[in-house]
Image (tube, rainbow, N blue to C red):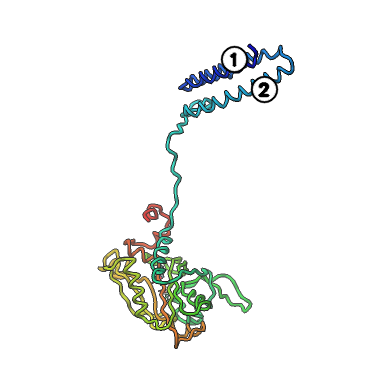
Amino acid sequence: MSLLQQLEELKAEALAELNSIDDSKKLESWRVQYMGKKSKLNEVLRGLAGLSIEEKKTVGAGANSLKLDLDVALKGKEQVLGEKIDQPAGEAPLDISLPGRTPPVGRLHPITQVITEMSQIFVSMGFQVVEGPEVEWDYYNFDMLNIPKEHPARDNMQTLWVDYENEKGERPMLLRTHTSPMQIRVMEKIKPPVRIVVPGKVYRYEAIDATHIPMFTQIEGLAVDRGITLADLKGTLYDFARRYFSSDRKARFRCDFFPFVEPGVEMSIECAVCKGNGCRLCSNSGWIEILGAGMVHPRVLERVGIDPSVYSGFAFGMGIERVPMLRYGIDDIRLFYGGDLRFLRQF
Ligand code: FA5
């Protein structure tokens, strides 16, 4: 029998035997028998010495391809048996049939979720969502909103100023204290009808307590058109409250003062923790203020080139964190930013 024929037979025999193997011990002895130093394959190769150069080439190539075939078949069998022969001693065998480890999946921060939900409610009423800069000019944050330099209303919004000086030696840049500057930026660009909401972060240098933090989120609303009245403002905000909280939740309007609206109001929602009876969170009043609002001041409209004898508008600025606090009965605003996953994972 020629050496090539011997290789063919060896291959058939090795593969048939491999087929019937069902454990790793047998597989190892199969490897030693057919692929080890004293294997049958090496025995055949020893016969190469007596051959001509031409024969050596063909038989050598056949032997190499047989080696390769046996190696591939061995690897396949290892996988089927679910364990590797060359696994380091002492390690548990790899069981490829076990389910994989689930990678931890992140989620949106509760405030981001609330912004999305609120925006959807206002979009369904015809408002567009826009965003604006958190680093703002004094001009937009105060001056254009009827709050000139010495106005006491500036004291209510303890301001974080940016360390930047212009050529006149002024420091006119700040971290916006509310989202209201976006009223001006929008009305400078878009003429009525205007209906926008602006969610975003705002900053105040304030003492921290259960309902106050120095970086919080607001959503501004602005509607300007012919014939807009305070009734439209109340209708919009009551509808929002009904849809976000439910219709049995009490909401209250009271007069308030903001230099950029006339008249000005504030809206409060019945405290969720004490159900209106009074507690630490609501300072025993039974109510938590969620927003300031009012009819856009005629002087503000004039400054952006909108004729107040033709157009009128309403605006509101709602503190976003306080809204989910009132829905879920969360008794401390700091929980949103404490990074405690036991709290955050509930949303
Ligand atoms: C304003 O910021 C006005 N720009 C609102 C406004 C807009 C009035 C348009 C008229 C027309 P105020 O400072 O009251 O108003 O803040 C609005 C809301 O932000 C508050 O009702 C409250 O819900 C929330 N808020 C205020 N300060 C904080 C704070 N430190 N931490 C958390 N929420 C706050």
Residue lying furthest left: 277
Q: Give the mark nearer the N terminus: 1 vs 2.
A: 1
Can you say which quadrant of the picture contains the N terminus? top right
Place residue 259 in its image quadrant.
bottom left
Number of disc labels: 2
291 is higher (above) or lower (below) than 151? above
Between residue 189 and residue 303, name the one nearer to us: 189
Quadrant containing ligand 1: bottom left
The residue singled out by tag 2 in the image is 61
What residue sits 51% from the left and 84% below the top? 305
Residue that extends furthest to the right in the rendered view of this protein: 53
Q: What SS does tag 2 mark?
A: helix
Q: Secondary structure at mark 1?
A: helix
Checking the image for residue 17, the label placed there is: none
Nearest the viewer among 296 and 344 is: 296
- Mark 2: few/some/many CA within 10 Å (<14, 14-19, 20+): few
- Amino acid type shown at disc 1: Lys
- Residue 126: x, y in percent? 41, 72
Q: Nearer the viewer, residue 61 or 183?
A: 61
Snapshot quadrant of residue 275: bottom left
Question: Residue drawn 41% across and 54% down?
Answer: 340
Disc 1 versus disc 2: nearer the observer: 2
What percent of the width, then of the height, locates residue 343? Answer: 37, 55
Rendering quarter of residue 123: bottom left
CA–CA distance in space, label 1 to label 2:
17 Å
- Residue 71 lies, with reference to residue 175, above or below; the image says above
In this rendering, the answer to whether 25 lies above or below 202 is above
Task: Say which of 71 and 334 sits in front.
Answer: 71
Is 301 located above or below residue 38 in the figure? Answer: below
Query: Could you tell me which quadrant the C terminus lies in?
Result: bottom left
Residue denoted by label 1: 40
Give coordinates of residue 117: x percent, y percent. 39, 63
